[in-house]
């Protein structure tokens, strides 16, 4: 028998009960599922519907959608189906959101690049001119409902300072929407020292200085190594004065490689639940993955309800 890799967690955190209850207390949004004709995304939508988190609009090849629904024994006759195969699906979702007919958009069986190509360009009509989008993961570990908001680990590959400022702003706004009006954010770097040969250290300092005026309700510190963000004991041992250490609500990463690795280590190695969404558009966009388990899909759907209600 092949044993699991020893660093993989055998425990998976559920979707936080408080987050789910908050979402269920709000109006049910109309959620456009892009390329809905596959088992995993359609099953994920079914879970959201059964929990009162979505009124579905199923977009894609209508024959495939109906056939897949039969496979999972789900009666979709009450729901709206939009025939828009392949790359047309995300374009149709953008049209519905632009017209106010969809409150959020969920990724189905489609490559992320194809999915976002129909949503992010200014021609899609979902993004104000000059607005930079960012992805935020809402991550909770087993036994705790307090989230760490991680940005950006899924959308911006090698973001500029200005894009990282926008990602930090989106994360702070999400925290505020969730009820945290005094957030603490650490800007990740390999060291707390300003080293010109390590550009993200000086960039982190620039972002932290900007945040003092731009984000008055947030305490932002950086550059900070990972141990300093996560551990007050590490900060004490290094004689590093910080109100963020061991108490961070947000972590801002320098690039998608570090962010994505952190996200996956938290999910696979710590058993965390990680829901997430793209912010900066007219409606929240849920980037669900085929490998996500039910708690993460439910968490993403719950976040979509809460953010849609605040838009």
Image: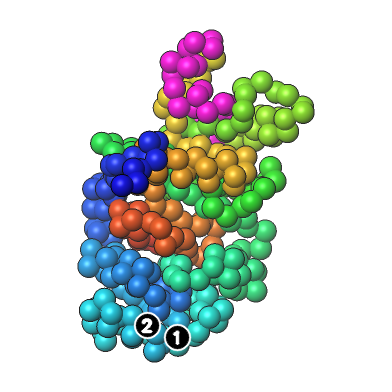
Give yes or no for residue 97 being in the magenta stretch. Answer: no
Q: Name the residue located 65 percent from the left edge and 33 percent from the top edge.
A: 204
Q: Name the residue located 62 percent from the left edge and 40 percent from the top edge.
A: 254
In this rendering, the answer to whether 63 lies above or below 192 is: below
Q: Which of these two is toward me, 302 or 85?
A: 85
* x, y percent for residue 5: 39, 40
Classify mark 2: helix, strand or loop: helix
* x, y percent for residue 47: 27, 65
Residue farthest to the right, as pictured: 197
Q: Which of these two is toward me, 64 or 187?
A: 64
* x, y percent for residue 31: 38, 71
Give the extent of the magenta segment. Answer: 213-239
Classify mark 1: helix, strand or loop: loop
Q: Decide: marks 1, 2 in contact (CB < 8 A)?
A: yes
User: Horizontal placement of 209 versus 262: left or right?
Assistant: right
Q: Name the residue located 43 percent from the left edge and 67 percent from the top edge.
A: 106
> Residue 83: which disc?
none
Label 1 packing within 10 angstroms: few (<14), some (14-19), many (20+): some
Residue bearing mark 2:
65
Using the rendered view, name the quadrant where residue 79 is placed.
bottom left
Give yes or no for residue 235 being in the magenta stretch. Answer: yes
In this rendering, the answer to whether 133 lies above or below 169 is: below
In space, the residues marked 1 and 2 are separated at their CA atoms by: 6 Å
User: Horizontal placement of 81 versus 74: left or right?
Assistant: right
Residue bearing mark 1:
61
Q: Name the residue located 26 percent from the left edge and 76 percent from the top edge.
A: 72
Q: Which of these two is toward me, 289 or 126?
A: 289
């Amino acid at each position: 028998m092949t044993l699991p890799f020893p660093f993989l967690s055998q425990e998976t955190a559920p979707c936080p009960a408080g987050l789910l209850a908050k979402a269920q207390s709000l109006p049910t949004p109309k959620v456009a599922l892009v390329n809905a004709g596959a088992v995993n995304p359609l099953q994920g939508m079914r879970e959201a519907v059964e929990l009162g988190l979505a009124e579905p609009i199923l977009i894609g090849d209508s024959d495939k959608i109906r056939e897949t629904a039969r496979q999972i024994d789900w009666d979709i006759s009450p729901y709206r189906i939009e025939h828009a195969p392949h790359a047309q699906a995300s374009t149709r979702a953008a049209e519905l959101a632009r017209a106010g007919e969809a409150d959020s958009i969920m990724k189905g069986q489609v490559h992320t690049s194809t999915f976002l190509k129909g949503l992010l360009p200014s021609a899609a009509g979902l993004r104000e001119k000059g607005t930079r989008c960012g992805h935020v993961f809402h991550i909770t570990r087993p036994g705790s409902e307090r989230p760490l908001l991680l940005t950006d680990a899924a959308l911006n590959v090698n973001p500029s300072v200005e894009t990282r400022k926008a990602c930090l702003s989106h994360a702070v706004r999400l925290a505020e929407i969730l009820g945290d009006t005094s957030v603490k954010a650490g800007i990740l770097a390999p060291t707390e020292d300003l080293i010109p040969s390590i550009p993200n250290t000086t960039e982190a300092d620039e972002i932290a200085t900007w945040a003092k005026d731009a984000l008055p309700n947030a305490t932002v510190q950086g550059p900070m190594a990972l141990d300093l963000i996560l551990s007050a004991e590490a900060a004490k041992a290094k004689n590093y004065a910080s109100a963020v250490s061991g108490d961070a609500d947000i972590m801002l990463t320098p690039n998608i490689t570090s962010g994505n690795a952190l996200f996956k280590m938290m999910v696979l190695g710590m058993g965390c639940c990680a829901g997430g969404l793209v912010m900066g558009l007219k409606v929240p966009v849920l980037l669900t993955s085929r490998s996500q388990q039910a708690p993460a899909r439910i968490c993403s759907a719950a976040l979509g309800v809460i953010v849609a209600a605040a838009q």
